[in-house]
Image: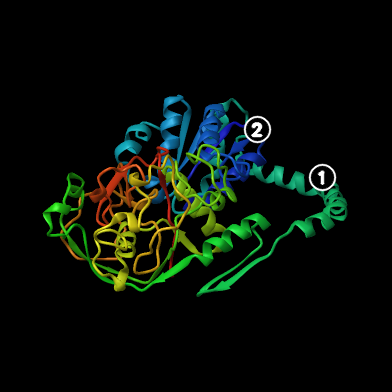
């Protein structure tokens, strides 16, 4: 697709982004925006990179949520490196900090609050000037004239075409429309945004959800046995009290088949196997998957917070205090490890469950968490989400490659860049109860 403008925005500002896109395209300025222009099964990162490089202008919808969005930051980096014209469209008074300040501070801003719709004409003129397109001085009238033109001159033709297409395509459309209903274990979904193969995967995912009763626990490394302590444990110092509400967590790690129903499997597994745990994921990959399922189902589907993950791995209120998830002495009872001489993640399950009936929370593939990494504070917290900003994202559980089994305890923490596809790293889904 040839386009003039790339629109960068956080998902919370989607309505404003769509309205801006509509305004520009009504004035014959072609736009590119995700997810509208991303074909099903395609890789977000590759297409976004290509789309920015082909654009002449990058319009950035800047807001409180955009300021912390990894996607927006990544898109800004590419636009800056490619020396694109960047036009910031400011939706609120969020100040510039860090990377955003470096890239955007010298740009001409359009302050579009409290009502961004009143600034569409200013943005239209700025974009048009940047791409060398002439726009009438009275841009408001230009927008309205184009709307009236399409309405009155083309309206009859468009209506006729639509009626013909409906007559021809309606039987096929009706047969391909898939209504999906799920009502089990306290989870309710009713949607038409799903294909038959996706409905099969979604049922598989929802059927595996385990309701975890919330409670209090001491998060962090509080084991007294010195033989269990390793260098990795320095990341989990400062044990502290945590209180959690009820939530659902998957009994298993996400499988390659469940991933493939929504996104391409290419480059996302070491060795293919439908029932093997998906791996080779970046944090961004995992987050997009969660966002997609949330959009389809209306449920709050996410990566587990680090606190949710550790609480569930320990066994929640049923915890027996095991060092590993489901066992204290013999990790081979509960985990696929380097002892099994694997070259990739194993099929999910197959070992012993923990107290909540969860598999593979120790070993097999590591699992991304929602939180940025930071050292713990020694204070009591309720439903913590970790720090608001950071560089790295948390990984938990250890994987089949790790030689020192004590680095796979329920308290052990790892971290990595959210942008890197990480070998032997996948995800486990959580549904938060609203």
Image height check: is 51 above or below 307? above
Is there any visible trace of residue 293 in the rendered image? yes
Front position among marks 2 and 1: 2
Query: How did the renderer colour the structure?
Result: rainbow
- Residue 207 x %, y %: 53, 67
Residue at 23% from the left image edge and 50% from the top image edge: 406
* Residue at image location 58% in from the left, 63% down from the top: 203
Q: Quadrant of residue 34 in the image?
A: top right
Q: Is there CB contact under 8 Å for labels 2 and 1?
A: no
User: What secondary structure is found at the residue carrying circle 1?
Assistant: loop
| Mark 2 lies on residue | 1
Judging from the image, what secondary structure is the residue with disc 2 in? loop
Q: Position of residue 127 (x, y in %)?
A: 55, 33
Q: How many marks?
A: 2
> In the visual, does 411 lie left or right of 71?
left
Q: Residues within 10 Å of mark 1 (few under 14, many from 20)?
A: few
The crowd level at tag 2 (other Cα within 10 Å; few <14, some 14-19, many 20+) is few
Q: Against 94, is 30 above or below?
A: above
Q: First in sequence: mark 2 or mark 1?
A: 2
- Residue identified by numbered label 1: 153
The residues bearing labels 2 and 1 have C-alpha atoms spaced at a distance of 27 Å
| 38 lies left or right of 291 | right
In the displayed structure, 207 sits above or below 406; it is below
Identify the residue at horizontal 35%, vertical 38% (top origin): 100
The disc placed on residue 377 is none
Q: Residue at x 32, y 67 (%)?
A: 315
Query: Height in image: 200 above or below 32?
Result: below
- Quarter of the image with the C terminus in it: bottom left
Is 277 in front, or is 380? 277
């Amino acid at each position: 697709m040839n386009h003039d403008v790339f629109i960068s925005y956080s998902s919370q500002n989607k309505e404003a982004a769509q309205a801006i896109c509509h305004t520009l395209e009504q004035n014959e300025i072609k736009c590119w925006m995700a997810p509208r222009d991303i074909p099903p099964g395609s890789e977000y990162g590759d297409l976004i990179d290509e789309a920015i490089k082909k654009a002449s202008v990058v319009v950035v919808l800047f807001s409180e949520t955009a300021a912390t969005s990894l996607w927006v930051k990544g898109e800004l980096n590419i636009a800056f490196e490619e020396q694109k014209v960047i036009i910031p469209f400011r939706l609120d008074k969020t100040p510039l900090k860090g990377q955003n300040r470096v890239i955007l501070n010298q740009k001409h801003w359009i302050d579009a609050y409290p009502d961004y719709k009143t600034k569409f004409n200013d943005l239209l003129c700025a974009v048009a000037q940047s791409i060398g397109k002439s726009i009438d001085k009275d841009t408001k009238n230009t927008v309205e004239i184009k709307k009236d033109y399409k309405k009155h001159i083309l309206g009859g033709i468009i209506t006729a075409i639509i009626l013909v297409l409906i007559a021809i395509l309606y039987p096929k459309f009706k047969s391909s429309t898939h209504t999906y209903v799920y009502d089990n274990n306290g989870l309710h979904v009713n949607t038409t945004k799903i294909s038959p193969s996706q409905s099969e995967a979604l049922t598989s995912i929802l059927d595996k959800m385990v309701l975890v009763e919330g409670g209090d626990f001491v998060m962090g490394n509080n084991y007294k046995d010195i033989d269990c302590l390793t260098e990795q444990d320095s990341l989990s110092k400062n044990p502290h009290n945590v209180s959690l509400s009820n939530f659902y967590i998957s009994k298993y790690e996400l499988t390659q088949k469940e991933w493939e129903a929504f996104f391409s499997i290419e480059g996302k597994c070491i060795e293919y196997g439908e029932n093997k745990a998906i791996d080779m994921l970046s944090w961004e990959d995992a987050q997009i998957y969660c966002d997609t399922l949330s959009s389809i189902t209306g449920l709050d589907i996410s990566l587990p917070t680090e606190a949710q993950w550790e609480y569930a791995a320990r066994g929640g209120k049923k915890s027996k205090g095991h060092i590993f998830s489901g066992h204290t002495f013999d990790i081979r009872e509960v985990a696929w490890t380097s002892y099994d001489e694997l070259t990739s993640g194993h099929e999910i399950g197959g070992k012993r469950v923990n107290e909540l009936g969860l598999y593979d929370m120790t070993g097999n593939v590591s699992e991304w968490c929602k939180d940025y990494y930071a050292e713990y504070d020694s204070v009591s917290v309720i439903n913590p989400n970790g720090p608001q900003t950071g560089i790295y994202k948390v990984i938990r559980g250890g994987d089949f490659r790790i030689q020192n089994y004590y680095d796979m305890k329920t308290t052990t923490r790892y971290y990595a860049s959210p942008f890197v596809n990480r070998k032997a790293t996948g995800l486990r889904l959580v549904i938060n109860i609203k």
